[in-house]
Image (cartoon, rainbow, N blue to C red):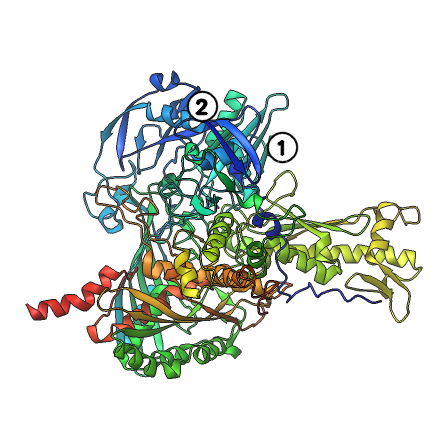
Amino acid sequence: MPQVTLTVNGQTHTQEVEGRTLLVELLREKLRLTGTHVGCDTSQCGACVVDINGESVKSCTTLAVMANGANVTTIEGLAAADGTLHAMQEAFREYHALQCGFCTPGMVMSAIDLVNKHPNGITEQQIREGLEGNLCRCTGYHNIVRAIAAAADVMHGKRTEIARAAE
Amino acid sequence: MNVVAPFEGIGASLRRKEDFRFLRGRGAYTDDFNRQGQLHAWILRSPHAHARLTSVDTAAAAKMPGVVAVFTGADMAKDNIGGLPCGWQIHNKDGSPMAEPAHPVLAADKVRHVGDPIAVAIAATREQARDAAEAIAVSYDVLPAVANTLDAVKPGAPAVHDGVGGNLCYDWHIGDKAVLDAAFAQAAKIVSLDMVNNRLIPNAMEPRAALGEFDPTTGDYTLHTTSQNPHVIRLLMGANVLHIPESKLRVVAPDVGGGFGSKIYHYAEEAIVTWSAGKLGRPVKWTADRSESFMSDAHGRDHVSNAQLALDANGKILGLKVHTYANMGAYLSTFAPCVPTYLYATLLAGTYTTPVIYCEVKAVFTNTVPVDAYRGAGRPEATFLLERLMDVAAQETGIDRVELRRRNFIQPDQFPYQTPVALQYDSGNYQATLDQALVTADWAGFESRRAEAAKRGKLRGIGISTYLEACGIAPSAVVGSLGARAGLYEVGTIRVHPTGSVTVLTGAHSHGQGHETTFAQLVADKLGVPTAQVDIVHGDTAKVPFGMGTYGSRSLAVGGSAMMKAMDKIIAKGKRIAAHLMEASVDDIEFDRGTFRVAGTDKTKALVDISVAAYVPHNYPIDEIEPGLEETAFYDPKNFTYPGGCHIAEVEICPETGKVSMVNFTAVDDVGRVINPMIVEGQVQGGIAQGIGQALLETCVYDADGQLLSGSMMDYTMPRADDLAPVSVATHTTLCTHNPLGVKGCGEVGAIGSPPAVINAVVDALRDYGVRSLDMPATPAKMWQIINGGRRMAAE
């Protein structure tokens, strides 16, 4: 069986995998990082999105062997060691951008990459189009869009903390 | 220094307690659980809509690598495993019970829909189990199939079940037809409309999963499952299917990734993994692929109706006549029979003073996935029918569509209001929600927006829906008399610990609704305990005494009310203890948010003083009061609750592409008292997204042979962020008069009120094209045909 060595959330792992093993299966089944979810089998829903070498990638459509040597960040690796949330996580909480939480890990990972790809600011329409690859069945997206806009202000240095949602 | 604690009680938009784990990837969903020695199951499903199984040969599959067992329906029959039960019995017009054919866990001799389970392969890994399932050799004698509801009732249609004549599950009615006919004879105008309520596939983001375990040393079974109501699953599976006593069966529904109704029902896979775990003595896990979800999760809606509205010369409604065919699919799912009857026809008065209603419903078996409750369940179907009919009536009587609704509204002073279809509404103010929505949506200024859009080459339309629903399911005696095989009360336990923190046990189940926050707010409000010290326990039959689960917007109205009753008992007991400690009469003890006080004095005891005394009773009237501070209460609602309101949709259609864009959406809903406005807004937003999905994007498609064509997320259009626009959500409150919180429920209003508002807006946008009837979804192809079909024909 092929061997894969990769760094996940700062820790290096070496695992034997089948050629057909998907990255998400490696993360969930072998490394027991169950924060990354599988919501579909056609690469449509984005619940499985992780960061590979700075790019958001659907881990259900990535073979584990393709991640050999890669640096992977999953939802578990986002918050600081002391539990301080990433600005995107904090914004999702402040703006009630999650309900059942199942799409949330992939949504947050996609959103961070989306904001990083718009260093000069991001419009609501750009956020909505940028979320094409992530499905949420609970929220109707509106609060997700608001959360990402609020997180972008912090990630772009325009604010030091997440703007409070209107009551 | 006095630190003022932030207000966390009723009315606070408290940020959610559960978010910390979800945002950090620490949620614990069923598929996240793994056990020592765990095996994986893969279900072999029928590729045919209707076939006789002539042989199921598992020999080759059993020899595949990693395979531990392959089981078929015959193996289950040897163990006397029962079929999946139906929880509701409807009676025909003649009083005879509905047809209730067997629903085998694994197909015995026939398969009746694509996706019907035939066998299960169990192996060390999921991929090995899948490989083995593919190696099972099945010989099918393929039979003619029927998928379409109206085709199924035609003479000579293929019979889905032997012995069910005409594929008719039941032929039911409500109302007095003779009185209705008399009303119709008086009518100045009769408006008739044929409508299809499109079939939907729920698609909660977490696919269903189940993990069965068996401890041979104790005989205890444990099932982790993606369920909205674990106690009901334990009851149905234990008693009807596997014959395991409740004391030996624990069902856990941990974090669940959305339900929308689709995770209410007892599914075959739950029984398969539990039974297999017992047979093999090892844990067995099954997790659905999304493709399996499409062909095995219960679908929703799927009605074909004709509705006729009789009006007098002034536009007052004289009567409503409805005939509906409802698709049940191939088998009766747990709640299915009640959806097109008691959750549908009883809603046909809507917000109007319609004096007489007659509705007949024929429920039909087809070779399709079972159909059951999906967000709103019956009430969206009734609302769509009624609110479309009102618009057509307005058009054909020449009365403005808002004015026509106003003329027929139940007035605020008419509550309690008895409808002709069994329900008695307790409260509401439909004028107020309408007025507020008209202002917010700037209804009066619409024509200038239409003109502006026309300059840009767009067709702009506005549509309204003034809807009502019944939820807070349900008064047990009422639903029992209507065919429910169980009461639908709820249970709540309040456990005040010795040092004053609180654990709440509830039979409701949270799968996105934020119960861990909202319920904690009830405790903060009533007992004065900070929400950080309140933990909500749900979803585990080993921890929570009993419960009926979460559906029909019942968690707060029924489950929350049970908690309030239990807290009343805590306070009553606390007063007795406080009276002893402060040497006062119990009648003189007052309680307010955490403090017991002797009336008119400054003598007080905090709740924690009472709880310590209750658990460590060294100065305690132990002969008179039992130690401990824990109370359980059951709440059985006296009536349904009746949320209602007004939804206004504004759309633009691009004539070149046919694409309908949502440009504005306004919702003003009366959901009763609001505990957490942030969560209520989120629930309404999400419901509206599903309603817009039904109206514009989503539909389940079977071909004539019963093949599921919309069987993946590439074929079934789920709403995405750029399909939707910001929604303005507001509430206008009238209190429910019969539950202690005054709450009505907010989980389903969005999905109920919005589809007709959207379609009325689309029809309004198409007013120059003579569209009278329009079935959902309003896809670009359908719009393009309407807009350009005529133009092209004119050119030819």
Query: What residue lies at 45% left-to-right and 31% top-to-bottom?
Result: B82
Question: A5 or B572, which is in the foreground?
Answer: A5
Q: Is residue B53 visible?
A: yes
Q: Is residue B455 left or right of residue B475?
A: left
Q: Residues within 10 Å of mark 1 (few under 14, many from 20)?
A: few
Q: Secondary structure at mark 1?
A: helix
Marks 2 and 1 share the same chain: yes
Query: Taking B11 as reference, is B430 above or below it?
Result: below
Q: Mark 2 or 1 closer to N-term?
A: 2
Question: A12 or B248, which is in the foreground?
Answer: A12
Q: CA distance from mark 2 to mark 1?
A: 29 Å
Q: Which residue is mark 1?
A: B247
Chain of the residue under the numbered disc 1 shown in the image: B
Identify the disc placed on residue B674. none
Q: Which residue is mark 2?
A: B123
Residue B109, image x, y percentages: 32, 28
Residue B238, image x, y percentages: 53, 33
Query: Taking B547 as reference, is B641 above or below it?
Result: below
Q: Are marks 2 and 1 in contact (CB under 8 Å)?
A: no
Residue B662, image x, y percentages: 36, 67
Q: Secondary structure at mark 2?
A: strand
What's the residue type where badge 1 is placed? Ser
Q: Residues within 10 Å of mark 2 (few under 14, many from 20)?
A: many
Q: Is residue B625 visible?
A: no
